[in-house]
């Protein structure tokens, strides 16, 4: 029995060593964060609007049944990178006509309002996620995060952190273009099918 | 030519290390004095050759020799000289060379100053130290050669990572390394004792100065790293529970436990196998730190360039050294007889609880650090463990420890009179509670945990002062008598009081700056004004200022309090064109009451108003107490290290009998 106690340290160390060895697997990238939401339907949530901002609130149906590709951005006035990202998102909406919806995460309505007044509001709908429940449903790990939802209401892409800088923007734009191409394809299919059945 | 000399010197050091790892060990087993003595010369030679290699690398950095890959990647001809020198240990290869150098220096230390240690134990210790040397020297030469050349040489280097171009870098890594590589010698002592199968009071006394020296450096290194993150990196905090911070903190926790358990082994002959285990684990955690920083197993702000091959090599070294030593422990430790009976209320018991709490705390930190990896391996989920976990689990373990720290020094060996102690401390307890209630009132109901922590810090500070005053009979006897007593009190006792008081002061800083911190992040244009913690801060815009290898945007912030000018702060945003990156130089108004801390971030992007910036302003109350406390901790450790008892070694007559004993003990091994 006494001997067993003295072998305990080496047993623990061997177990930990096994995990460390596994951790060295060259295919593993610890800084990559996967999302369980990818290829899943938009999670259930229902958020009221921010008073005085002038755009309606946001719920599952608004995102899932938009009928085209929608970008959902989680932001907050207290988040510094969001400021930098705001300019990029605004450009996406103005130049590329992207449909952008916002989730205002754990933010005081008056702060959010002031922020949007200062910087401008590129969002077509904003849900006020005061208690962070919708954030949990979306599985966000921080603010900002940006999701691309396909026309069929499936979440296609998730970007953690601000979409700023050439690398991040290129990655995001590529995902967005793919989503849009997919939407056009699937829109063409039922039309074709209808055309076939009617003929 | 110099780099080749460096590489050659490293190879010679490896050869000497191989000899040293075998010859003295056999010498000790056969009682061959000459073989045992050889460790002295090989340790000297090893330290010399590694120092030559280190100097050769440093020279390449100083003269900006861009035929050396390491210099190209981590230096630039425009860099100030200090950072050229510091660049020597700014990369994986260079810092590993520093690691090996410190390893050799500690070996040399035992060879030179260990004359009071029995020859056999010293020879075995140096041999074990050489095993570690062989592992890391071969790692350096085989996978991470710092002297690799490149032809044709590039015209200029790619600059040292700008974040590292700071005075903090010049001293933080060397101090930290001195700390956790310093525990290698304690590890070697422990393994040598296991091989010899004997641990006694004298052993604990020989090990103590080395433990203390390593502990002081580690304390200083961690405090400096935290200071650096706070002042220079613009992170606006001093501790983030980042994996790499944690791996330096775990050896500190265990090293602290070791310092205390070694006292019991020295004074009472108890806790023998426990002290040995702590010595092994402390260095094991240092090795784990080296592995985590260099293998890329966990994400961290500190990681070096990652290479799986290196990861496998270090893991192999880890497996050999930790696995080997613990296997030896499992085999030999059960035979070590415990000694020294003690009552449930006694200094032994107090130190036992201290040890348990510190080990539990280290276990919590280890668990939190490795949990993401374990979870990912088992379920594939990726998570990160952050401050909420550590604050919720680590602090509750620390609070009782701080409470007991106040009582511990009053306890006598074997059996203590708890009632008498409590009577002495009753007044102090009342004062601490009153101060806590006062701060609760002043801060209009601050968080309960913070109030409790403040009460405990005050308790510790006063109890420590009381114990010290009692020892020198301050106010109880004429001043001259007290002074005489203070002079006669062992320096180790002064050191303990100072270190405990330092801990109390540091806790005030930890609590003040985390519980009552105010923070504002605002978008500013010239003329905007912010109100924070009673200060009014006006932003007057920025100007472009050139630096040696960067250009800076320097902001001007005029700080006033109730209309009275206080100071002007100049936070900077620096752009390093060669390395293509930017850093933040925060501006701080330091006072004992708290720091007003300002940093500027990227001008708000396109579309924003001209001259607009994101300004982050923090007020961190009491934060300087952390550094003051840390200085006291190191100073207390230093005082204890200078204690006469540690220099003269074991009492003479005892030492003599031991010498005559060691000869017959060595013969049966043949």
Image (tube, grey):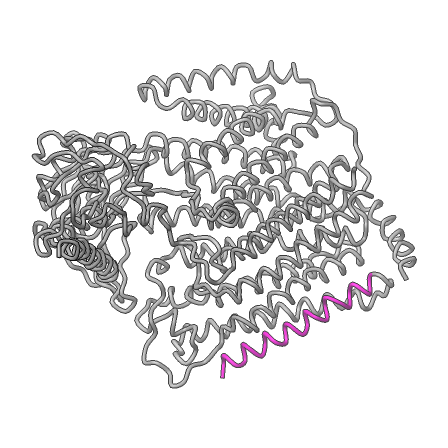
| Of B434 and B592, the residue lying toward us | B434
Q: Is residue B256 left or right of residue B545?
A: right
Residue farthest toward the bottom in the current orientation of the protein: B152
In the picture shown, does residue B655 fall above or below B412? below
Q: Position of residue B264 (x, y in %)?
A: 71, 36
The C terminus of chain B is located in which quarter? bottom right
| Of B515 and B462, the residue lying toward us | B515
Residue farthest toward the front in the current orientation of the protein: A199
Residue at 62% from the left image edge and 49% from the top image edge:
A15
Start-end of magenta stretch = B1-28
Q: How many marks?
A: 0
| Of A154 and B413, the residue lying toward us | A154
Residue at 27% from the left image edge and 47% from the top image edge:
A154
In the picture shown, does residue B77 fall above or below A187? below
> Most prominent secondary structure in the magenta stretch?
helix
Q: Quadrant of residue B389?
A: top left
Q: Position of residue A73 (x, y in %)?
A: 21, 45
Q: Can residue B481 be seen at all in this image of the molecule?
A: no
Q: Position of residue B244 (x, y in %)?
A: 47, 50
Residue B377 shown in magenta: no
Q: Can residue B3 be seen at all in this image of the molecule?
A: yes
Residue B21 shown in magenta: yes
Q: Position of residue B478 (x, y in %)?
A: 59, 22
Residue at 20% from the left image edge and 35% from the top image edge:
A59
């Amino acid at each position: 029995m006494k001997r067993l106690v003295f072998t305990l340290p080496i047993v623990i160390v061997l177990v930990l060593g096994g995990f460390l060895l596994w951790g060295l697997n060259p295919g593993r990238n610890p800084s990559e964060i996967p999302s369980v939401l990818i290829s899943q339907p938009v999670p259930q949530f229902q958020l009221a609007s921010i008073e005085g901002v002038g755009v309606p609130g946001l719920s599952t149906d608004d995102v899932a049944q938009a009928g085209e590709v929608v970008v959902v951005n989680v932001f907050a006035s207290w988040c510094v990178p969001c400021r930098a990202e705001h300019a990029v998102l605004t450009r996406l909406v103005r130049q590329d006509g992207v449909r952008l919806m916002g989730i205002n995460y754990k933010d005081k309505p008056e702060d959010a309002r002031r922020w949007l007044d200062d910087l401008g509001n590129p969002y077509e709908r904003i849900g006020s996620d005061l208690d962070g429940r919708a954030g949990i449903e979306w599985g966000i790990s921080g603010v900002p995060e940006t999701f691309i939802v396909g026309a069929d209401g499936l979440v296609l892409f998730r970007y953690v952190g601000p979409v700023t800088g050439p690398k991040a923007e290129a990655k995001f734009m590529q995902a967005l273009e793919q989503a849009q191409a997919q939407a056009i394809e699937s829109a063409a299919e039922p039309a074709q099918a209808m055309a076939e059945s009617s003929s | 030519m110099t780099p080749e000399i460096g590489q050659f010197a490293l190879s010679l050091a490896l050869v000497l290390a191989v000899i040293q790892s075998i010859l003295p060990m056999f010498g000790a087993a056969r009682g061959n004095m000459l073989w045992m003595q050889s460790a002295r010369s090989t340790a000297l030679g090893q330290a010399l050759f590694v120092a030559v290699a280190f100097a050769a690398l440093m020279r390449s950095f100083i003269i900006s020799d861009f035929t050396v890959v390491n210099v190209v990647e981590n230096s630039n001809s425009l860099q100030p000289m200090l950072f050229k020198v510091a660049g020597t240990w700014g990369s994986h290869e260079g810092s590993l060379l520093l690691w090996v150098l410190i390893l050799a220096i500690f070996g040399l230390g035992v060879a030179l100053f260990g004359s009071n240690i029995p020859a056999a134990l010293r020879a075995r210790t140096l041999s074990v130290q050489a095993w570690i040397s062989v592992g890391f020297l071969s790692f350096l030469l085989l996978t991470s050669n710092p002297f690799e050349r490149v032809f044709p040489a590039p015209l200029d280097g790619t600059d040292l990572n700008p974040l590292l171009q700071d005075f903090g870098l010049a001293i933080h890594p060397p101090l930290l390394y001195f700390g956790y590589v310093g525990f290698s010698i304690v590890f070697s002592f422990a393994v040598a004792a296991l091989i010899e199968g004997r641990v006694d009071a004298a052993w604990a006394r020989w090990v103590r100065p080395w433990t203390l020296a390593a502990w002081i450096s580690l304390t200083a290194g961690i405090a400096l790293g935290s200071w650096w993150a706070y002042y220079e990196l613009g992170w606006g905090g001093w501790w983030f529970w980042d994996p790499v911070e944690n791996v330096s903190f775990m050896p500190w926790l265990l090293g602290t436990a070791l310092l205390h358990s070694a006292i019991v082994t020295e004074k009472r002959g108890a806790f023998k196998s426990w002290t040995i285990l702590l010595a092994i684990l402390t260095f094991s955690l240092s090795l784990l730190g080296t592995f985590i920083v260099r293998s890329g197993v966990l994400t961290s702000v500190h990681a070096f360039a990652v290479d799986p091959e290196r990861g496998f090599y270090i893991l192999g070294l880890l497996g050999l050294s930790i696995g080997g030593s613990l296997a030896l422990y499992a085999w030999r430790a059960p035979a070590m007889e415990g000694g020294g009976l003690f009552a449930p209320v006694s200094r032994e018991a107090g130190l036992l609880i201290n040890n348990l709490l510190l080990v539990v705390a280290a276990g919590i930190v280890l668990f939190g650090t490795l949990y993401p990896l374990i979870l990912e391996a088992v379920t594939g989920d990726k998570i990160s463990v952050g401050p909420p976990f550590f604050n919720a689990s680590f602090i509750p373990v620390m609070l009782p420890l701080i409470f007991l720290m106040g009582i511990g020094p009053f306890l006598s060996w074997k059996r203590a009179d708890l009632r008498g102690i409590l009577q002495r401390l009753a007044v102090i307890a009342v004062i601490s509670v009153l101060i806590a209630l006062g701060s609760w009132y002043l801060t209009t109901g601050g968080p309960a945990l913070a109030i409790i922590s403040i009460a405990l810090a005050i308790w510790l500070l006063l109890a420590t002062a009381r114990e010290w005053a009692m020892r020198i009979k301050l106010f109880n006897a004429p001043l001259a008598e007290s002074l005489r007593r203070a002079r006669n009190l062992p320096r180790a006792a002064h050191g303990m009081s100072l270190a405990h008081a330092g801990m109390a002061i540091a806790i005030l800083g930890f609590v003040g700056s985390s519980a009552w911190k105010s923070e504002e992040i605002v978008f500013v244009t010239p003329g905007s004004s912010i109100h924070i913690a009673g200060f009014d801060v006006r932003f007057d815009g920025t100007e472009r200022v050139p630096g040696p290898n960067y250009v800076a945007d320097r902001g001007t912030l005029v700080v006033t309090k109730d209309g009275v000018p206080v100071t002007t702060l100049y936070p900077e945003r620096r752009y390093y064109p060669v390395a293509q990156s930017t850093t933040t130089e925060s501006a701080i108004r330091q006072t004992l009451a708290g720091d007003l801390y300002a940093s500027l971030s990227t001008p708000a992007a396109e579309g924003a108003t001209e001259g607009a910036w994101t300004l982050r302003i923090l007020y961190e109350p009491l934060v300087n107490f952390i550094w003051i406390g840390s200085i006291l901790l190191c100073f207390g450790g230093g005082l204890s290290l200078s204690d006469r008892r540690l220099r003269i070694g074991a009492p003479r007559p005892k030492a003599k009998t031991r010498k005559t004993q060691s000869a017959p003990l060595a013969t049966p091994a043949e």
